[in-house]
Amino acid sequence: MPQVDRESLSASILTKNEGANIMRRGIGHACKVLVAAFLGGCASVPEGLHPVADFQVGRYLGTWYEISRLDHSFERGLSKVTAEYFTRDDGSIQVVNRGYDAQRGKWREARAVARFVGPSDVASLKVTFFWPFSGAYHVIALDREGYTYAMVTSSSRSYLWILARQKTLEPAVRDDLLAKAKAWGFKTEELIFVEH
């Protein structure tokens, strides 16, 4: 049976343990960097787009109907979709998104809290459905007179919603918003028009 050099074996074990600790620290650091990058990127505005300025949050509060959207798994199959916004005591905004899932025969609801990422007169918010993950909410087009329609995006052009105070939009207004969205680089041919 060969002789084992205890010093070499101890050094080898120590090196493996140190290596494991270094690897754990490295993975932990990488995860923190990825989470920070994800959260930091969530509030960014897609390049070339600008949130509405001179925004009046008090006029934006209340119920909005989803007219159209780029589809995502969290809304897939939903009709009669609404978004409601209310102020909270701390100045943040309570968000309640609701839609009907016909396949399951029931309503689905998601609640969130929104906070401005800068001045409250710029329509750029960070929405948190569950901590610590947030998403961006940027109003990029708005009926400035009556606050009767809005176009909203997130941190990329993969997200687009057209909202209105009524369940339908005048065709001329809808067509104008679609033309803007297309000019801004959104895939308008993939929009879903929501049934109410």
Image (cartoon, grey):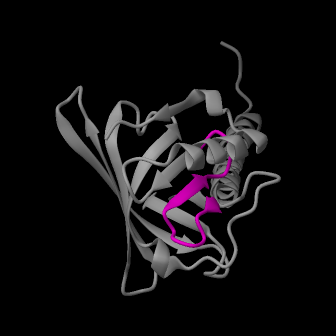
Q: Which residue is found at the position 66% from the left and 82% from the top?
A: 119
* Residue 141, position as x, y percentages in the image: 64, 59
Q: Tell me if 24 is positioned left or right of 167 in this view.
A: right
Residue occupying the far right of the picture = 48
Q: Which residue is found at the position 71% from the left and 46% from the top?
A: 180
Q: Quadrant of the C terminus?
A: top left
**Front-lying residue, 173 or 103:** 173
Q: Which residue is found at the position 59% from the left and 28% from the top?
A: 190
* Residue 127, position as x, y percentages in the image: 51, 63
Q: Is residue 142 magenta?
A: yes
Confirm whether residue 174 shows in the render. yes
Confirm whether residue 160 shows in the render. no
Q: Quadrant of the N terminus?
A: top right
* Residue 158, position as x, y percentages in the image: 64, 39
* Residue 152, position as x, y percentages in the image: 58, 54
Q: Is residue 85 above or below residue 36?
A: below
**Front-lying residue, 36 or 192:** 192
| Residue 186 figure quarter | top right
Residue occupying the far left of the picture = 105
| Residue 13 figure quarter | top right
Q: Tell me if 13 is positioned left or right of 61 in this view.
A: right
| Residue 191 figure quarter | top right
Range of the magenta residues? 139-159
Q: Is residue 30 above or below residue 3?
A: below
Q: How many marks?
A: 0
Q: Is residue 191 magenta?
A: no
Q: Is residue 25 above or below residue 115?
A: above
